[in-house]
Image (tube, helix red, strand yellow):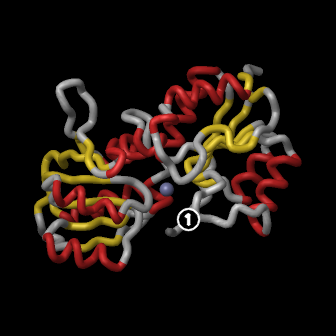
Amino acid sequence: MNQVSTQQLATWLDTTLQAQRFKDYCPNGLQVEGKASISHIITGVTATQALLEAAVAQNADAVLVHHGWFWKNENPCIVGPKRKRLALALQHNLNVFAYHLPLDAHPVLGNNAQLGRILGFEPDRDANGSPMVCGPDGLVWLGRCTPSKTLEEIGNNVCNALQRRPLIVGNPQQNIERIAWCTGGAQSMMDAAVAAGADAYLTGEASEPTFHLAQETGVAFIGAGHHATERYGVQALGSAIAQEFGIRVDFIDIDNPV
Ligand SMILES: [Zn+2]
C-alpha cells in the first residue's frame, strides 16, 4: 500500500493551497498530529464527531476538511463536544488537516472554482487566465451564465446540481447574465457583487438584511446552502492528493441542511 509521511503531505498541502497567504479565523494545515505516515484519508466538509467516527471505522490515518477546529471566536477550552472530538482523534492517532479560506480561494481546486464548474458558471478571466474576483481576500468570483438564464432557471439548476432547493430573492423571470458567487457563509460579501455589476449573487447562507439588499438593488440573491456549496473543493483536493501520492482518499458527505 502506498503511503506518504504526514510531514510531507502537510508541506505539499500548505504549498499547493498557499496557506500562508491568508489571514484566517482558524489555523490552516495540520491541526492535530496523529500517525507519522498516511495511506488512507477521509475527506469531508466539517470535522464533526460523525465524520471522525466514520474515519475511525474505516481505519483511516487522517481526515481532511474545510471546516476544522480552533476558531477565533469560540471558547478555547477543551470541553463538551470539542473534548469528545479531540479525544477520539488522539485515541486513534488520527491526523486532522483543515484548510478554510485557502480552500475557498484556490483557482482550480477551490470551493468557488468547483462550484462554478458544477453549476455551469463561466468565470471571467484576466489576460493571464486567472479568475476575476472581488470582495475581501478576492473570495467572490465573477462570471457569466451562457446562454443567459432566468433566475427561475438558475434556481432549478442549483436544485438539481446540489440536491437542495435554494432560497431565492428576486423576480423569477429576471434575466441573469452576470453572476457572482462565493461558497459558504458569504452573505456579507453581497455588496462586492453589487458593486461589480452582477445581476445575481449566489452564496450558502442568508441573513435578515440580505433580503433588503437584494430588493433595493435589484440584484437577485440565491442562498444555496453553506454545506451544499462547500462539498466540492475538498473532493477536488482529495483527487489531487490521490493522484500525487497514490494513496486512498474517500469523501464522506454527512449532510447538513444549513
Ligand atoms: Zn464554510
Quadrant in which the N terminus appears: top right
**Residue lying at 70% horizontally and 26% vertically, measured from the top left:** 7
Q: Is residue 37 left or right of residue 238?
A: right
Crowding at label 1, few (<14), some or many (≥20) Cα neighbours within 10 Å?
Answer: few
Q: Is residue 118 visible?
A: no
Q: Position of residue 33 (x, y in %)?
A: 77, 38
- The outermost residue toward the right is 91
Q: Which residue is mark 1?
A: 256
For residue 169, which quarter of the picture?
Answer: bottom left
Q: Position of residue 50 (x, y in %)?
A: 72, 59
Asked if 161 appears above or below 250 in the picture, the reply is: below
Q: Mark 1 near ligand 1 (CB under 8 Å)?
A: no
Asked if 126 appears above or below 243 in the picture, the reply is: below
Q: Position of residue 200 (x, y in %)?
A: 20, 60
**Residue lying at 19% horizontally and 31% vertically, measured from the top left:** 126
**Residue lying at 65% horizontally and 41% vertically, measured from the top left:** 97
Asked if 93 appears above or below 158 in the picture, the reply is: above
Judging from the image, what secondary structure is the residue with disc 1 in?
A: loop
Amino acid at pointer 1: Asn
For residue 143, which quarter of the picture?
Answer: top left
In depth, the one of 258 and 32 nearer the eye is 32
In depth, the one of 172 and 88 nearer the eye is 88
For residue 151, which quarter of the picture?
Answer: bottom left
Q: Is residue 109 visible?
A: yes
